[in-house]
Image: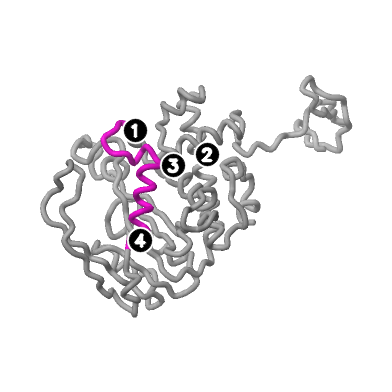
Amino acid sequence: MTCKKCEHGPAKRFGFTKAKTARYRCRHCGATFTEPKQNPLGAHTTSVQAAAKVFALMIEGMSIRSISRITGIHKTTILSLLTTVGAKCERLLDARVRNLSPDSVQCDEIWQFCYSKEKSVPEEKKYIFGYGDVWTWTAIDADSKLILSWHVGPRNAHAASTFMSDLASRVNNKIQLTTDGNKVYWAAVVRAFGANVDYGIINKVYVGPGKAGRYSPGQFVSATRDIGYGSPEPSRISTSFIERHNLTLRMSLRRFTRLTNGFSKKVDNLKAAVAVFMAWYNFCRVHQTLKGRTPAMAAGLTDRVWSIEELIAMESPAAIAA
C-alpha cells in the first residue's frame, strides 16, 4: 500500500476505522489513510441500488420531477447521474456493438425538440443545434432487434452521413439496408458503404391532414418499394421494425412524449437519456419475439439478461469491452 501523502511504501496496517475499514500508516511520514474505494458512479455518493431505481423509473416513462418525488433524490442529482451513466452507456455501446453480421437493417429518424419548439426559439439562439428541432437517427437489425447505431442531431445531410458512417463501421458484411424516402439518405449510404450494400427505399404516400388530432398523419394511400442500388430483396424492403421501435422509444422516455412539459431543456441531457435507453433496450429488455432473450443475446453479444445494476455498475473500459 502506497502512502497518499508522500507516495512512499509499503505502509503498515494500523487498525480499523469506526466503519470497520482497514487503516494504514506510512512508515516514512506517519500519515494514516484507508484503501481507496472503487466507486462505479465516480464522485456520486448515491448507491448503485438507488441509481438503478432512478433509471428503472426513467425508462418506464417517468419525468425527472416525478422520479425525484418517488425516490427522494434531488432532481439536480438525478440529472448529474444521468450525465455520468449516459456517458458510460455510450462507451458500452461503442465498445460492444461492433463486428456484427446482420442480414437486414432498417433505418429511420424520430423527431423531438429541445429548449422550445422551433417556432418559439429566441432570435439569438436560432440556427444553433440544441435549440428547437432535434432528431434521433436509429438503425435496427430486423432479425435480432438489436439497435446497431444511433445519432442525435439535426435532420440534414451531414447528420445522415455521420449516422451512416457509424453504422458502416459496426458491420463486417454486405447488408440489405432499408430507409424511407428522405432524400439525404442516398448520398450518405453511398459515401459510407460504397458497393458493399443492397439498398432499398420504401416510399409511403399520405393524403390530407389527420382527423384525430394535430399530430396525426394524413390518410395512408400506398407504399412503393424502390431499389436504391444493388440487389435488395423486395420482400425485405420495409421499415416496420424501426418504426415500431420509434414507438417504444417515444413511450419509454418522457422527453419524447408529445404535449407535455417533460421535453429536454439541454441537448446533452437528451443524448445521455437516449444512450441509457439504447443500452437498456439492447442488454436488459427481454423482447417478446425473441423467446425470453434480449436483442444483445440474439445477436451473440452476451449470454444472459443484464440487470440495470449491472448496466450502470460497469467500471472500466476493459470490463466494458469484455
Q: Which mark is residue 107?
A: 4
Q: Which residues are magenta?
A: 239-261
Q: Look at the image and say whether residue 242 sits in the magenta stretch.
A: yes
Image coordinates of residue 221 in percent, x first then y, are: 16, 61
Q: Is residue 46 left or right of residue 165?
A: right
Identify the residue position indicated by label 1 in the image. Answer: 262
Judged by depth in the image, the label closer to the viewer, 4 or 2, is: 4
Image coordinates of residue 135 in percent, x first then y, are: 31, 49
User: In the figure, residue 130 lies in which quadrant?
Assistant: top left
Q: Mark 3 or mark 1: which comes first in sequence?
A: 1
Indicate the secondary structure of the residue bearing disc 1: loop
**Amino acid type of the residue that numbered disc 4 sits on in the rendered structure:** Cys
- Give me the C-alpha separation between circle 3 and circle 1: 13 Å
Given residues 23 and 250, the one toward you in this image is 250
Could you tell me if the residues under marks 4 and 2 are in contact, i.e. CB atoms within 8 Å?
no
Q: Is residue 135 left or right of residue 312?
A: left
**Amino acid type of the residue that numbered disc 2 sits on in the rendered structure:** Thr
Q: Mark 4 or mark 3: which comes first in sequence?
A: 4
Identify the residue position indicated by label 3 in the image. Answer: 273
Q: Mark 1 or mark 4: which comes first in sequence?
A: 4
